[in-house]
């Protein structure tokens, strides 16, 4: 076949692809590990220029949340558009927790149906894996050693340039998961030390060891920003920036005290930045949004109907500068992470107040001792707590043995140190939030509305022990008929 014939065929193929897909936007979805909104554009004084620029070019969400502060649970939720109690991924995939079924609609299946190429870089961390039929996978391990990080950009460049068909590429970075590596491949060039920072404020403890851990966590965030910058440059070099929606989130908060594996703000509140070419830029929005809103947003990007069963709603109107009537209440939950820390829990917040429901009130939360353990801190718990105020010490005592309800005024007490539950002046507020929580539990099919179910799950996990064994059969009682 002569070169003229080949060029003609290539031209014809390009025209055919353009005719079929038109200006259908690509989706570049960036997910980082174990970090809240600790970056300069959210007010933390560290250098994150690439994420800051992305926020300036798009929309930054101040009040973005995950449904559960755990890796597998968070990822299954944003890919299925369902809460963990709805899809069944209530604990870590590495501990054999899994979704109820592989048959749920999910982002990957849905976008493939309308012609998207789908790619995954980094770990999936959801069971069963075959529920998510990605066309392309690379760098599939967790990579907590952060080895060969340039491979993420190299593989992304390869996938982006492979075809003119629209693409969905999910890039999962290992930073800022533990271990908090202060430097990898000379990134950052000048690592922060404990002398340069104060501890993350929601911990309430400014001990030297926590300052050093905070510094190393910030070093992870600075390095993450650099890698995201390389990825965005690869997108620009491909010539596809002007037709690609870029979404960035963290999968849940930092693995520090009162963060990951809790229902506190440090665990469930995350960064969310979205840049949609042609939408409004430079927005700083206060709406209560969830990663459950991403699936319906992706559907609207792809100009396709949104599945009716999804728990969230599309962010399209907000991203384009609109002010639609929005949710007044946002809900999160917790079940288990590894078997070391079962603690069924539900929470609801409105614009100002947040209520946490502990169906196992009176029990000791095993996650408390796990987080304070030697795996995370060299300094004994008593010494760490001795370095702070009585108000904060009381908050940790409450965390160890929680009451039935916790109520916080997030306007006056953003770090949730002062439990206002049962305060007479807030009786109406507490009653309203309890009623909204019960309504949501009923509407979402949450079996945990019965305290006996929470106790059954708790005892089952405790009986299984902390060695990885066969999967627990929790499904029959977690799903309402």
Image: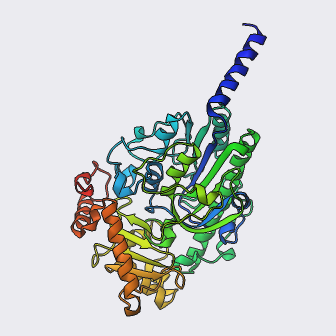
Residue 182 appears anywhere in the view: no
In this view, which residue lies farthest toward the top? 1
331 left or right, relative to 274: left
Which residue lies at the image location 64% right of the left edge and 48% below the top edge? 245
Q: Nearer the viewer, residue 476 or 140?
A: 476
Q: Quadrant of residue 461?
A: bottom left
In this view, which residue lies farthest toward the bottom? 424
Give percent across and percent down for residue 267: 48, 67
Give percent across and percent down for residue 323: 60, 65
Give percent across and percent down for residue 398: 38, 82
Which residue lies at the image location 59% right of the left edge and 55% below the top edge? 316
Q: Nearer the viewer, residue 286 or 75?
A: 286
Q: Quadrant of residue 70?
A: bottom left
Query: Can you say which quadrant of the picture contains the N terminus?
Result: top right
Give percent across and percent down for residue 297: 54, 51
Query: Can you say which quadrant of the picture contains the C terminus?
Result: bottom left
């Amino acid at each position: 076949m002569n070169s003229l014939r080949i060029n003609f065929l290539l031209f014809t193929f390009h025209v055919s692809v353009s005719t079929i897909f038109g200006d259908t936007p690509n989706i570049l979805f960036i997910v980082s590990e174990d970090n809240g909104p600790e970056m300069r554009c959210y007010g933390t004084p560290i250098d994150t220029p690439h994420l800051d620029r992305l926020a300036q070019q798009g929309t930054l969400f101040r009040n973005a949340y995950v449904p559960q502060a755990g890796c597998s649970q968070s990822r299954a939720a944003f890919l299925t558009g369902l809460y963990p109690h709805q899809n069944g991924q209530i604990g870590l995939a590495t501990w054999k927790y899994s979704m109820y079924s592989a048959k749920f609609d999910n982002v990957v299946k849905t976008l493939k149906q309308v012609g998207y190429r789908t790619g995954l870089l980094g770990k999936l961390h959801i069971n069963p894996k075959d529920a998510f039929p990605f066309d392309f996978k690379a760098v599939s391990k967790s990579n907590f050693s952060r080895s060969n990080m340039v491979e993420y950009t190299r593989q992304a460049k390869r996938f982006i340039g492979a075809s003119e068909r629209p693409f969905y590429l999910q890039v999962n970075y290992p930073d800022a998961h533990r271990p908090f590596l202060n430097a990898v491949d000379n990134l950052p060039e000048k690592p922060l030390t404990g002398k340069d920072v104060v501890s993350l404020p929601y911990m309430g403890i400014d001990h030297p060891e926590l300052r050093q851990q905070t510094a190393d966590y910030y070093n992870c965030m600075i390095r993450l920003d650099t890698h995201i910058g390389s990825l965005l440059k690869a997108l620009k070099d491909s010539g596809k920036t002007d037709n690609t929606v870029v979404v960035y989130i963290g999968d849940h908060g930092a693995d520090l005290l009162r963060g990951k594996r809790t229902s506190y703000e440090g665990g469930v509140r995350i960064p969310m930045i979205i840049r949609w070419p042609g939408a409004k830029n430079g927005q700083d929005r206060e709406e209560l949004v969830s990663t459950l809103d991403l699936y319906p947003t992706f559907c609207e990007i792809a100009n396709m109907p949104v599945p009716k069963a999804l728990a969230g709603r599309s962010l399209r109107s907000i991203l384009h500068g609109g002010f639609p009537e929005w949710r007044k209440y946002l809900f999160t939950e917790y079940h288990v992470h590894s078997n070391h820390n079962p603690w069924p829990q539900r929470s609801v917040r409105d614009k100002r107040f947040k209520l946490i429901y502990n169906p196992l009130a009176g029990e000791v939360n095993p996650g408390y001792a796990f987080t304070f353990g030697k795996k995370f801190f060299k300094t004994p718990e008593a010494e760490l707590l001795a370095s702070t105020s009585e108000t904060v010490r009381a908050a940790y005592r409450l965390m160890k043995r929680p009451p039935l309800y916790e109520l916080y005024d997030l306007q006056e007490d953003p770090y949730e140190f002062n439990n206002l539950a049962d305060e007479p002046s807030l009786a109406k507020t507490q009653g309203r939030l309890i009623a909204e929580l019960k309504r949501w539990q009923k509407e979402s099919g949450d079996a945990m509305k019965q305290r006996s179910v929470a106790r059954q799950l708790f005892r089952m996990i405790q009986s299984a022990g902390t060695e990885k064994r066969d999967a627990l059969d929790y499904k029959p009682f977690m799903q309402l008929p």
